[in-house]
Structure formats: structure tokens, C-alpha cells
Image (cartoon, coloured by chain):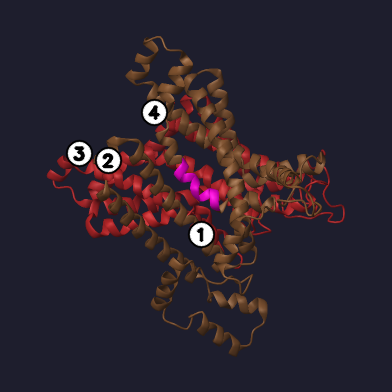
Chain colours: A brown, B red
């Protein structure tokens, strides 16, 4: 088990190093260096420019620059934003973390309750009209561009019917002495539309994973044995089959981890949700390369962490994988 | 290869939803090729002062704030979207197949370097990789957009092909061919590649749906297809300020995306079900 863990961790670390190299190279393909865009925007003299170049180490050879970049990573140094100069990228990301976690968390809970239930329902009614229609509906949701769905919901629910706020996370007009409950209700109202949009476009994945996993398990002998012993269909379905159909969901949870933190670029941008996703969208508009790179870096690190955690979960839950 | 494509189409045609998807796709392609001469110029702005007008007989989908005909622009957008997606996926598939073949066939250090790079590249979410790449250009040309989409889409394919090559390397027919004196090239093109086309075409179909959504998203963010070339994502971006007063300007391009992607996904789903009947 320890050997497995060491090997897995080494692999993850090596992959992360590759990610760093790739992202570093991506940033260097851009014409000029990160600072040239800063100069365009802030009108800096040539002398000041040279001083800045020296300060950010851009006058160093490429290998040295990469070394500085990598050695800065453990301490969370992701460089300086151009748009928000002189704020460091890591500070900006930290400020936006909370709202993304909130939105991502709500979507994740919705997804895993509703998605699992519907997936199990499809598996137990395999081939029925219900199964077919749920497949079609979820496939439609999967084919929707999230930014368009978000705009349509805003147009209808917020602008036409004026039921829910169209943007931001809180109401700026909310009085300063509003109670905690009022504040929570306010955030809740702002949360509904973005969470709904993201759930609709992402539910299909969870449903499909759960349906396939459940079908795999329901074929096995022990499920038939449980039915043969006269246990109720509900009991067989949830206590016997479903428990064993949870493994693929662990993988799915690993896939979701990055989304939880970085949020959705499109949906956060449209609802002006103050998370990391909308920060990335702002970085695109401002051509803020270091900021976008920092966001990509966090996302990639989380993808690796998610894979690692999913593998670890498998290891803890399923003793059979321990020998491998 | 042509045989494999025909066989795949036949497979998709056999399921009702796959058939529906193929029919819709065929209709869309036919419209995109044949309709433009019958429609107004998608770039013409006959009456900019009138602004966006609602759907009427002269303009079935209405006009946008610059008085351009939305139907003509949606149809022109079909051309752009389908070409970008089609070419992007072909580039991705070819690159992925090549890298996978080389990694699996050559093995050793080459394999390690290639596959570790793929591991790293797969950890970067595709949207972020695309955004970083498209920002290299001030206004990205269409050809570069296609290349960039192809360059970020081959990692999964290379793993798939490498896996198949490793599985087939010691298969009876490959050993026999090797014993008969086939060279590397012949082994690859005649014995390894044909056996990987099935899973490749499923991946390609689902890839087209993904790429159409990505391209629309990039264009919506202003870093994809550049105006004045009509694109669905770009049209939705242009229509955003008039969302309430002229909802048709964002409704129709969005519906075009949904219908196209859904049709592609129906075909992909039918293919997947045919290749993996246990999950159907």
C-alpha cells in the first residue's frame, strides 16, 4: 500500500512538472513578453521598462526564468497580474475562491443527489419509455451551450418576469443592518439561476455514469440472489446493488474537483458571479496572460489532485485494488 | 478507411435516434451548402437605423441590431461551425493516431516522453489551453483557430491508439505478418491502423459535438471566429446588449447550436451503444 502510494505520488508530481513546463512554454509563444502588454496599457518609459524587466527577471535566459517560475510555485507565487498591476495573481485567486466554492458546491450536491437518483431510476427501468426519455432529455441538456442557456434564463426569469436577480452574488441595495438570515436569503436568490444553468448542462454526465455502473452491478449473481431471497425491490436496489455501483462515481467526483474551485468561465461571467471563472473571463478581455496562466495552473493542479483522490478512495473502499 | 466510415454510418442508421441525428445533420449540411445563394448577404447592413426588427416574412428569423438578416447569418454560421469542427477534429485525430502509433510501435524512451507529455497536457482543462493559445493572436485567423482546436484535442486519441497498438502488437495476425517479412510501415497501415478505426470514429463523432460547443464559447468570449465572419457564438455575443428588446437575435443562433450538437451527439451515442452493447 505504501509502495503504491509512493509510486502514485511520484507519478502525479512528474505530471505536474510537465504541466508547469507546458504552461510556461504556452506563455512564451505569445509575441513579446508579459510586460509588453503592461506597457501598452500604462505608458511606461523605456528606462522604467528596463527596470521592471529586471525586477521580474525577464532579462534572464529562458532556463533561469523557468527555474524562478518553478521555485516560486511552492510558496504560491504565480506572478503578477497585468490588469490588476501590481497585485499578485495568487491574491486575486484567493479573493475569488469563496464564491466559486459556494456555486460549485451547490451544483455538486444537486448533481449527485438528483443525478444519482435519476441514473438508478433509468437502470432499474432499462429500455422503458422513462429510460429513453430521460436519456433524450439529459442528452439535450448536455448539448446546450451553457452561456446561451444562462442568457435565455436571464432574459426570461430576470428581465421579463423579474423574479430573480440577473447578476452578482449579493444585492448592493441591501441595508447594512440586515440580519444574517436576510443576507443568506439574498445570496440564495442570486444563486438559483447560475446553479440551475450549470446543473442542467452537467446532469447528463452523472446520470450516465450512474446508469452504466448500476447496470453493471445489477447483472451480478449476488443481486439476483438477494431478489431470490425475497427481499423487497427497494432494498435490493439501494442496499445491495447501489452500494456496489458507487465506485465510478468516485472517479466522477475526482473529475468534478477542479470545477468546484475554478467554477465555470461562461456561467460565472454571464451572472457576474465573483468567482475564479469570471476572473478568468476578465483576464481574457484584459489579455492578462499571467492571470489566465495562474487560473489554468490551479485548474490543472486540481485535476491531478482529483485523480489522485479518486484512486485513493478506490484503494480505501475496495480491498482488491490494494494488491495492485 | 472509406469502408470503415460507411460501416459506421450504417451502424448509426440502424438505431432510431442515430437515424434522427444523421437526418438532421444531412439537412443542416445541405442547407449550409445550397441555401446561401437564395438568402440575403449575411454581411449586408441595408438599414442600420431601423435596428433589430422582429421575425417577419422578409426576414423569417428577424434582423440583428445592424439590420443584418439573422437567417442568412445562422446558415453562414453553420458553414463556419461545421468546417471548424470537422477540420479541427480531423487534425486532432490524425495527430493523435500518429503519436499513438509511434509511441506504441517504437516504445522505449520515445514512448515514455510522449506519454508523459500527454499526461501533463490532459491535466490542463481544454478550455484554458485554448484560451491561452488563442490569446497569442490579437485577432485569431480562422486557419489558426482550426489548428489550435486540433492541437488541443489529440491527447485522448493518442492514448486510445497506443493502447490498441500495444494490445494488437502480439496478436496472431500481426505476428504472422511480421514473420512474413512485413516492414514497420506495412504493419502499421495494413494491420494496426484498420483495427483502431472503430473506437476512433466514435471518439471523433463525440469530439465534433464538443468542438462545436467550444468554438461557440470561444467566439462568444471574442477570441474565436472573428467578426465580420458570422459565427453562432459571435452572433450571441453581438445580441447580448439587446437581450430583452430583441431576444430573437440570440434565440436563433443558440437553437442552431443546440440542434446541431444534439444531432451529432445522437449519432455518437448510437455508435457508442453499438460498440458497447452492455451499457445500452
Mark 4 residue crowding within 10 angstroms, few (<14) / some (14–19) / many (20+): some
Which quadrant, please, contains the N terminus of chain A? top left
Residue positioned most to the right? B50
- Residue nearest the observer in this picture, B82 or A296: A296
Residue at point 16%, 42% (across, down)? B175
Q: Chain of mark 3?
A: B
Q: Chain of mark 2?
A: A
* Left or right of B237 on screen, residue B59: right
Q: Is residue A258 magenta?
A: yes
Residue A296 numbered tag: 1
- Residue nearest the observer in this picture, A235 or A80: A235
Q: Chain of mark 4?
A: A
Decide if residue B223 is in sight here: no
Mark 4, secondary structure of its residue:
helix
Label 2 near label 4: C-beta < 8 Å? no
Q: CA distance from mark 2 to mark 1?
A: 33 Å
| Magenta stretch bounds | A253-261
- Residue nearest the observer in this picture, B275 or A291: A291
Instruction: Check if mark 1 and mark 4 are on a common chain.
Output: yes
Secondary structure, magenta segment, majority class: helix
Residue B171 numbered tag: 3
Label 4 near label 1: C-beta < 8 Å? no
Label 1 near label 3: C-beta < 8 Å? no
Decide if residue A231 is in sight here: yes
Q: Nearer the viewer, mark 1 or mark 4?
A: 4
Which comes before the other along the chain, label 2 or label 1?
1
Q: CA distance from mark 4 to mark 2?
A: 17 Å
Instruction: Check if mark 4 and mark 2 are on a common chain.
Output: yes
- Percent of width and height locating residue B43: 72, 55
Amino acid at each position: 500500500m505504501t509502495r503504491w502510494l509512493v509510486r502514485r505520488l511520484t507519478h502525479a508530481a512528474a505530471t505536474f512538472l510537465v504541466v508547469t513546463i507546458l504552461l510556461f512554454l504556452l506563455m512564451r509563444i505569445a509575441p513579446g513578453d508579459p510586460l509588453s502588454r503592461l506597457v501598452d496599457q500604462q505608458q511606461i518609459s523605456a528606462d522604467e521598462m528596463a527596470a521592471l524587466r529586471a525586477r521580474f527577471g525577464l532579462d534572464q535566459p529562458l532556463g533561469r526564468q523557468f527555474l524562478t517560475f518553478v521555485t516560486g510555485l511552492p510558496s504560491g507565487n504565480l506572478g503578477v497580474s497585468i490588469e490588476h498591476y501590481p497585485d499578485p495573481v495568487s491574491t486575486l485567486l484567493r479573493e475569488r475562491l469563496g464564491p466559486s466554492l459556494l456555486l460549485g458546491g451547490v451544483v455538486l450536491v444537486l448533481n449527485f443527489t438528483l443525478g444519482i437518483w435519476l441514473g438508478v431510476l433509468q437502470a432499474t427501468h432499462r429500455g422503458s419509455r422513462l429510460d429513453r426519455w430521460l436519456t433524450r432529455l439529459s442528452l439535450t441538456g448536455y448539448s446546450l451551450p451553457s452561456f446561451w442557456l444562462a442568457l435565455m434564463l436571464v432574459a426570461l426569469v430576470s428581465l421579463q418576469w423579474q423574479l430573480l436577480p440577473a447578476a452578482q452574488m449579493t444585492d448592493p441595495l441591501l441595508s447594512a443592518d440586515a440580519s444574517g438570515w436576510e443576507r443568506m436569503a439574498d445570496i440564495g436568490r442570486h444563486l438559483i439561476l447560475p446553479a440551475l444553468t450549470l446543473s442542467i448542462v452537467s446532469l447528463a454526465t452523472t446520470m450516465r455514469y450512474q446508469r452504466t455502473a448500476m447496470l453493471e452491478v445489477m447483472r451480478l449473481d449476488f443481486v439476483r440472489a438477494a431478489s431470490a431471497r425475497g427481499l423487497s425491490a427497494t432494498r435490493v436496489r439501494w442496499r445491495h446493488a447501489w452500494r456496489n455501483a458507487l465506485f465510478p462515481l468516485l472517479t466522477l467526483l475526482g473529475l468534478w474537483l477542479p470545477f468546484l474551485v475554478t467554477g465555470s468561465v461562461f456561467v460565472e461571467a454571464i451572472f457576474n458571479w465573483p468567482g475564479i471563472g469570471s476572473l478568468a473571463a476578465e483576464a481574457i478581455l484584459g489579455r492578462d496572460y499571467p492571470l489566465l496562466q495562474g487560473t489554468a495552473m490551479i485548474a490543472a493542479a486540481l485535476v491531478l489532485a482529483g485523480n489522485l483522490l479518486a484512486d485513493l478512495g478506490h484503494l480505501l473502499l475496495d480491498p482488491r485494488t490494494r494488491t495492485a | 478507411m472509406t469502408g470503415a466510415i460507411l460501416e459506421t454510418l450504417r451502424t448509426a442508421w440502424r438505431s432510431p435516434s442515430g437515424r434522427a441525428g444523421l437526418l438532421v445533420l444531412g439537412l443542416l449540411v445541405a442547407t449550409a451548402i445550397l441555401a446561401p445563394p437564395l438568402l440575403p448577404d449575411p454581411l449586408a447592413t441595408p438599414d442600420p437605423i431601423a435596428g433589430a426588427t422582429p421575425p417577419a416574412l422578409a426576414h423569417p428569423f428577424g434582423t440583428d441590431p445592424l439590420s443584418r438578416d439573422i437567417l442568412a447569418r445562422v446558415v453562414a454560421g453553420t458553414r463556419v461551425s461545421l468546417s471548424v469542427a470537422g477540420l479541427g477534429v480531423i487534425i486532432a485525430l490524425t495527430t493523435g493516431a500518429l503519436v499513438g502509433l509511434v509511441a506504441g510501435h517504437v516504445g522505449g524512451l520515445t514512448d515514455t516522453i510522449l506519454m508523459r507529455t500527454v499526461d501533463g497536457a490532459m491535466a490542463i482543462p481544454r478550455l484554458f489551453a485554448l484560451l491561452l493559445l488563442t490569446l497569442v493572436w490579437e485577432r485569431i485567423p480562422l486557419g489558426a483557430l482550426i489548428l489550435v482546436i486540433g492541437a488541443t484535442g489529440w491527447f485522448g486519441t493518442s492514448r486510445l491508439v497506443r493502447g490498441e497498438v500495444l494490445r494488437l502488437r502480439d496478436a496472431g495476425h500481426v505476428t504472422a505478418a511480421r514473420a512474413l517479412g512485413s516492414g514497420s510501415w506495412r504493419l502499421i497501415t495494413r494491420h494496426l491502423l484498420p483495427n483502431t478505426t472503430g473506437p476512433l470514429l466514435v471518439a471523433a463523432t463525440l469530439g465534433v459535438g464538443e468542438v462545436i460547443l467550444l468554438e461557440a464559447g470561444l467566439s462568444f468570449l471574442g477570441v474565436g471566429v472573428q467578426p465580420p465572419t458570422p459565427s453562432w457564438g459571435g452572433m450571441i455575443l453581438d445580441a447580448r446588449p439587446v437581450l430583452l428588446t430583441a431576444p430573437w437575435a440570440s434565440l436563433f443562433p443558440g437553437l442552431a447550436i443546440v440542434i446541431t450538437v444534439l444531432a451529432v451527439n445522437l449519432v455518437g451515442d448510437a455508435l457508442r451503444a453499438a460498440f458497447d452493447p452492455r451499457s445500452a
